[in-house]
Image: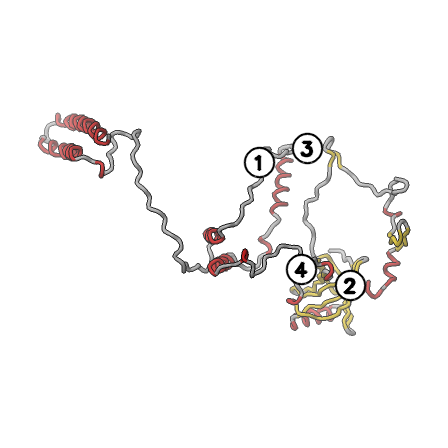
Amino acid sequence: MARSLWKGAISFGLVHIPVEMYPAVGSKSLDLSMLDRRDFAPIGFKRYNKETGKEVGWDDIVKGYEYESGEYVVLSDEDLRRANPESTQTIDILAFVDAEDVPLLYYDHPYYLAPGKGGDKVYALLRETLKEVGKIGIANVVIRVKQHLAALVCIGDTIVLNTLRYPDEIRETDDLKIPSPKAKAAVISAKELKMAMALVEGMSEDWKPNQYHDTYREDVLALVKKKIKAKQTKTITMPDPEEKPAKKTNVIDLVSLLQASLGKKPGKAAVPDDDDDDEPPPPKRARKPSDDEDEDQAPPPRRKTAAGAREQVAASTDKPKRAATKPAAKPAAKKAPAKKTVAAKKTSAAAAPARRKKAA
């Protein structure tokens, strides 16, 4: 079972709900250690006294506030707790607001809230009330040594405390070059908007968080396993000198990009082509025969000469006629077609110089 990191109560009006706080997310980042490339020994960091240079253990470390240069007031965990015990033990709801009124930019870090001992009924009452009215609670809470603004949100059967950023923590956008909807460079045509909407519609689907993965982390871990299997545990892969970064290109024809995107990802709603701006592709030209092609290959019909046509007709009709005059009962007549074939080849060979002469 997960260990709670904070115990206290939710308080609003005269209501007091004992709760325990648990982490709602866990980081899955790659845990890479720093090594000395000369002998691949791990590199460590020391907590040391800046006056003496000696290492200091955790038991000898205390917190202090520097009120003047080099002068400190020492504050223990008990001092911090006694400073305002009510703030450190309660989630004080200040107001209830509509969830859509709080921009996503303000949300910071989520925590699960579970009911403490004897708090099941009041916990369920707050949860069902928030669901019924469709609002979230805005509260103050102190976690460790920092006070947070927080939002109490119902997700399923759980009340989630999501810390919020203060307004002065949100940076202004005045220094950013954000295009105005009325700027000339940001004018969007009706056709571009229609195609973009069709692309969004075609890529729309139900939210399924389990289908998304940290593919970069998975690929790196697969590479680690591959190196272990190949016994390349201490091999440094150097960058390929031939690799060059991809060239940056400016987006010029937005319509063509949208059309290509729609082709790759078919939309559920087709975009009617109201404009006839697209011209049909030019007709394909007939390929001219090269001089290196087989001489026995027949030329295109337009290049045929009258003599060559008569010779080809004679060669094609001569064989059936002569075969018909031969008696079928004689066995010696089986060799006749071979002679006729030789004659036909001679006729075709005689016709080839005539075609080359005509082409010249």
What quarter of the picture does the N terminus occupy?
Answer: bottom right
Please tell me which residue lies in front, 19 or 276: 276
Depth check, mark 1 against mark 2: the one in front is 1
Depth check, mark 3 against mark 1: the one in front is 1
Q: Circle 2 is placed at which residue position?
A: 141
Mark 3–mark 1 Cα distance, whole angstroms, equals 23 Å
Look at the picture and state if 145 lies above or below 235.
below
* Label 1: element kind: loop
- In percent of the image, x 81 and y 57: which residue is there? 145
**Closer to the N terminus: mark 3 or mark 1?**
3
**Closer to the N terminus: mark 4 or mark 3?**
4
Q: What amino acid type is highlighted by mark number 2?
A: Val
Q: Disc number at residue 243?
A: 1
Q: What amino acid type is highlighted by mark number 3?
A: Lys
**Image quarter of residue 270:** bottom left
Mark 1–mark 2 Cα distance, whole angstroms, equals 52 Å
* Label 4: element kind: helix
Mark 3–mark 2 Cα distance, whole angstroms, equals 48 Å
Please tell me which residue lies in front, 270 or 281: 281
Q: Are marks 4 and 1 in contact (CB under 8 Å)?
A: no
Depth check, mark 4 against mark 3: the one in front is 4
**Image quarter of residue 111:** bottom right
Label 3 CA crowd tier, 10 Å (few <14, some 14–19, many 20+): few
Residue 318 relative to residue 87: left or right: left
Label 1 CA crowd tier, 10 Å (few <14, some 14–19, many 20+): few
Depth check, mark 2 against mark 4: the one in front is 4
Q: What amino acid type is highlighted by mark number 4?
A: Leu
Q: Are marks 3 and 2 in contact (CB under 8 Å)?
A: no
Q: Circle 3 is placed at which residue position?
A: 234
Residue 123 point in image, percent of width and height = 72, 68
Residue 28 point in image, percent of width and height = 68, 49
Q: Disc number at residue 105?
A: 4
